[in-house]
Amino acid sequence: MTTSAPPPGEVLFLLAGDPDDIASACADLLPVDIADGINDLPVEGGMRVLTAIPFHLAVQVVDEPSLERRDELIERLEDDFAIPLIQALSADQQVRLFRDLKESDRVRLLHVLDAPTRNQLKLLLSFPPQSAGGLMTTEFLGVPPSWTALQVRLHIAQVGQAKETVYAIYVLDEKTQKLLRVVSLREVIMAQSEMAIGQIGEGRKPVTVHPLTDREDVARRISKYNLLAIPVVDDAGHVLGICTVDDLIDALVSEQTEDVQKFGGMTATDEPYMDLSLLTLVKKRAGWLAALFLGEMLTATAMGYFEHEISRAVVLALFIPLIISSGGNSGSQATSLIIRAMALSEVTLRDWWRVAARELPTGLALGAILGTIGLARVELWQYLGWYDYGVHHLLVGLTVSIALVG
């Protein structure tokens, strides 16, 4: 069945409709499409939608990473609806929600949640948000090595719906609960029914991460080993949870958005552009603009020292914007290359001298190319009579050329 996000007209209908109409309109939509529709509504409209649709569907909608203002929705919903909803969310989305809640609401809700959910949240919230522990879910499938493939398949059928993902089976020591091996779902399905799960697969050492591992390093490891999920283990080898590829993608998209905003010279923001107030837009951008403006004032100060020289060759002032913009353009190119290299771990801060050794001759070569073009431009315009640079036109051209090289 083909589904699509509700068009703008239907979004307005959802806001004005009664609960039965809302439930009927959402019946054929995927949770992610309903979440996108709620994003277009005010908070009150989102609350009407969540309370009108079936509870299991509301859980799936709130569990969608794309849902915006989730904390505001939960804060304003009645506790008798919000608490079961929170407890039914996947562990990683519970953590994401509680990090966004106001401190007072966080403390209040933690006290009224059931003990397993509360203890799990306290554990996950103890890890930094940018770490594997702050990103992981505790919903994984662990079995003892003595179980047969048939037992595991039956177990998956029984509890699979309660797990966020069943990408792999984690074989745990029956006594110590340490991770022994990771068996893919494909291997479990293809194995003979009577074969012990501890004998399935290649038996190589599992690829794992520590809970304090940075999420970018987790993403690189998942990419390197072509995994859909990676177990997070403590120093003793006990599995604390798993990081899934979809959660990592969501986290990295958010982080890259922040990096791009900082690269553009503004304070990062998590809110969508259209939701930002005018005051917020000004506050996010004014600080860096003011700092950059103050830095560029040094150029005016430096030019003031050479006021006499410039007055004797005013024509040189025509080339100052050209020289400054060329320096900025070449700097942006170099910055983009190095940022990409650092993001892919091709270079680190310890490689600064190697980067400098490569960029110095590269900069000189590029400056020489631009300098040659600048000199040729001055001489060509002088020769064709398009502009008179005076009797010292060659000196003017060489000055521009040397400035571009330097």
Image (cartoon, helix red, strand yellow):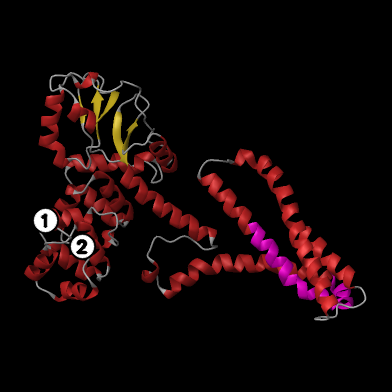
Extreme left residue here? 20
Q: Residue at x 66, y 58 (%)?
A: 330
Residue under the point 38% across and 63% down: 271
Q: How many marks?
A: 2
Q: Please give the residue where the numbered disc 1 appears in the rendered image.
A: 55
At 31% from the left and 57% from the top, the residue drawn is: 102
Q: Which residues are magenta?
A: 306-331
- Spatial CA span between label 2 and label 1: 14 Å
Question: Magenta stretch: residue 81 in it?
Answer: no
- Can residue 312 be found in the magenta stretch? yes
Q: Quadrant of residue 16?
A: bottom left
Residue 73 figure quarter = bottom left
Query: The C terminus appears in which quarter of the rendering?
Result: bottom right
Instruction: Determine the residue located farthest toward the right in the rendered image.
Output: 391
Q: Secondary structure at mark 1?
A: helix
Q: Quadrant of the N terminus?
A: bottom left
Most extreme residue toward the front, as rendered? 384
